[in-house]
Each structure stands twice: as structure tokens, then as C-alpha cells.
């Protein structure tokens, strides 16, 4: 990243990442909720006609708070997610930077992004996404199994053990690894283009946010199939419907066709673009503030 320097490593980036993730998740959760609902519905018999219809029906049935169902674990989880992402990324860049110039090559930036994505998937994203998906799917089905995120965690651990929180781990690792391997270097390239190489803009939240938004949208094109399989694997009925990740993907292709792998692509592009843009805009701002006190 343009705003990540040789000085950005250690525990400071962990704190910056947590604050960035929590703030970003609180601002964008409704789009995450709508995206998940559109992915979980059947293509053969859809409940919603699109983004607007899903939001309207949710608010009609559950009020505005319905769009924030499962948000608690997502907000805290996003803090941990970006804590691991930025912590891993900034520390990996110190290993892969050129010792003489201090610069990070495009290839090494991809490697650092991949490592950051895998780290966040294993340590934060998979359990958080599992809980969020189970809670939203429970509300969609009207089964009333969970009263909220905390209740879902307790019941999943009691009935399925710790591994219950890691359902769909493989597609999640694939998705997050690809996400960051694409997004990190793409943000750098887009930033260079829109800033016209002006180094004084490296800490600009506007330029970094705009580049992050476009990089986030671009990464969706390569990771939407993994995200759709992940959501299906983390749904309430997954244990009865699928034998595993590969079986889930094969059934989706057989029963619903290739389009099933791109369900919710537009709301996810909006959501990922927003979250990426906000994250890349917030991180340098929070960095500057924390650098004054830490």
C-alpha cells in the first residue's frame, strides 16, 4: 500500500487494523446482510427479486433492525479480521521488501496479500461468517432457532463443537487468499494511476479510499464463486444437503447452472467495494492518529 511504510509493523498495526475493521463493518453491514440473503435463496424458487426487494421485505417483516441481524459478531469479527489482515500484511512486507531500496515488488505484494488473506480466513473470517450466515439463514427460514449471534455461538459449540464454527473453511480460505492477493497489488496500481504518481497523496484518505473501492470491486469478479459455495456450506441445512465443499459446488452446477455461482454478485460488489474503500481510507487516518499517542 502507498501508505504502508517500513515503520508499519508490530503491535501498532494490529490495533489500527482492529479499529479500521470495526468501524467499516458498522457502516456497511446492511449490504452484507442483503448479499447473504440473496446467496442463500434458491435460484429455482427465489424469495427476493433483487437488492431493493430484499431490503424492503426485510424491513417490512422485521423493521430496520432486521438489516442488522447478526451484526454484533460481524462488527467485532471484522475488527479481528482486519487486525489479522493488516497485522499479517504489514509484517510480511518487512520480510519481502528490498533491503537496499525498501520497496515491495508487485510479485512480493501478491504474496504478502495472499498470506494476509489466509491468516484472516483461519483466525477470524471463517467462524465469524459461519455465525453470521447461520443467524441470517435462521431468520430467513423463520425457524427461530437463535435469538442472536451470542446465542448461535453457544448452541453451535454445544451441538457441533469448535469445528462447527469452521464449516466452509476451505472455500473461505480460497476466497480470502485470492481476495487479498488481488486487492492489495490492484489498489497500489489504481492509486498510482489516479494520483498521477504524486507522493504527497500517499496518506490521502480520498485517493486511498477511491483506489480501495475499485480494487474491491475488481476482486469480486475472481472470488464470487468461492463466496457463494462458502455461504451454502455455512447455511443451516448444509449438513443435510451437502457431503462437502466439492459436492456443494457440483450440486449447485447440476441443479442451478453456472449462474448460481454468481448469485448476489452485484450487492457483494457494492458491499466489498464500500468496505474496501472505507478500510483503505480509514487505515491511514487511524494510523496518523495512533502515531501521535503510541
Image (cartoon, grey):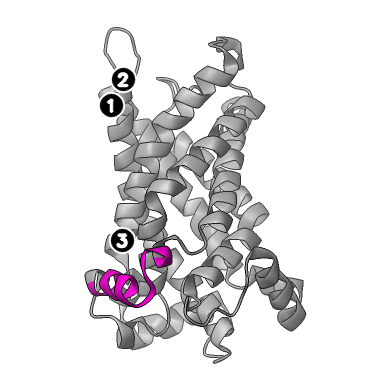
Q: CA distance from mark 3 to mark 1?
A: 24 Å
Q: CA distance from mark 3 to mark 2?
A: 28 Å
Question: Residue 196 in the image: x percent, y percent?
Answer: 56, 12
Question: Residue 102 in the image: x percent, y percent?
Answer: 34, 13
As drawn, which residue projects farthest toward the top?
100
Sooner in the amino-acid sequence: mark 3 or mark 1: 1
In the rendered view of the protein, which quadrant contains the C terminus? Answer: top right
Circle number at residue 108: 1
Side of 42 relative to 24 (left or right)? left
Res. 290 visible in picture:
no
- Residue 77 among magenta residues: no
Question: Residue 140 in the image: x percent, y percent?
Answer: 57, 82
Cβ–Cβ below 8 Å for labels 2 and 1?
A: yes
Q: Which residue is mark 2?
A: 105
Side of 62 relative to 107 (left or right)? right
Q: Secondary structure at mark 3?
A: helix
Q: Secondary structure at mark 1?
A: helix
Circle number at residue 171: 3
Sooner in the amino-acid sequence: mark 3 or mark 2: 2
In front of the other: 29 or 94 = 29
Q: Which residues are magenta?
A: 247-260
Q: Residues within 10 Å of mark 1 (few under 14, many from 20)?
A: some
On the image, which quarter does residue 128 sit in? Answer: bottom left
Amino acid at each position: 500500500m502507498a501508505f504502508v511504510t517500513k515503520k508499519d509493523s508490530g503491535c501498532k498495526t494490529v490495533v489500527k487494523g482492529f479499529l479500521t475493521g470495526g468501524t467499516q463493518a458498522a457502516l456497511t453491514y446492511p449490504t452484507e446482510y442483503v448479499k447473504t440473503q440473496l446467496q442463500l435463496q434458491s435460484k429455482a424458487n427465489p424469495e427476493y427479486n433483487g437488492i431493493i426487494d430484499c431490503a424492503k421485505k426485510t424491513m417490512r417483516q422485521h423493521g430496520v433492525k432486521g438489516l442488522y441481524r447478526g451484526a454484533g459478531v460481524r462488527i467485532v469479527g471484522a475488527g479481528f479480521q482486519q487486525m489479522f489482515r493488516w497485522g499479517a500484511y504489514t509484517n510480511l512486507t518487512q520480510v519481502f521488501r528490498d533491503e537496499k531500496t525498501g520497496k515491495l515488488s508487485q510479485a512480493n505484494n501478491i504474496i504478502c496479500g495472499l498470506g494476509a488473506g489466509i491468516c484472516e480466513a483461519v483466525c477470524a473470517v471463517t467462524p465469524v461468517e459461519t455465525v453470521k450466515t447461520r443467524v441470517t439463514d435462521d431468520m430467513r427460514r423463520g425457524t427461530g432457532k437463535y435469538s442472536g449471534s451470542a446465542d448461535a455461538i453457544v448452541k453451535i459449540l454445544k451441538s457441533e463443537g469448535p469445528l462447527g464454527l469452521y464449516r466452509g473453511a476451505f472455500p473461505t480460505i480460497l476466497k480470502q487468499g485470492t481476495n487479498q492477493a488481488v486487492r492489495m497489488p490492484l489498489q497500489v496500481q489504481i492509486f498510482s494511476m489516479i494520483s498521477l504518481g504524486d507522493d504527497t497523496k500517499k496518506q490521502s484518505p480520498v485517493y486511498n479510499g477511491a483506489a480501495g473501492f475499485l480494487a474491491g470491486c475488481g476482486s469480486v469478479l475472481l472470488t464470487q464463486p468461492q463466496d457463494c459455495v462458502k455461504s451454502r456450506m455455512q447455511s443451516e441445512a448444509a449438513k443435510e444437503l451437502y457431503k462437502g465443499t466439492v459436492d456443494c459446488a457440483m450440486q449447485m452446477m447440476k441443479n442451478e447452472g453456472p449462474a448460481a455461482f454468481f448469485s448476489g454478485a452485484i450487492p457483494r460488489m457494492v458491499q466489498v467495494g464500500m468496505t474496501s474503500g472505507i478500510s483503505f481510507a480509514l487505515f491511514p487516518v487511524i494510523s496518523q492518529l495512533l502515531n501521535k499517542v503510541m
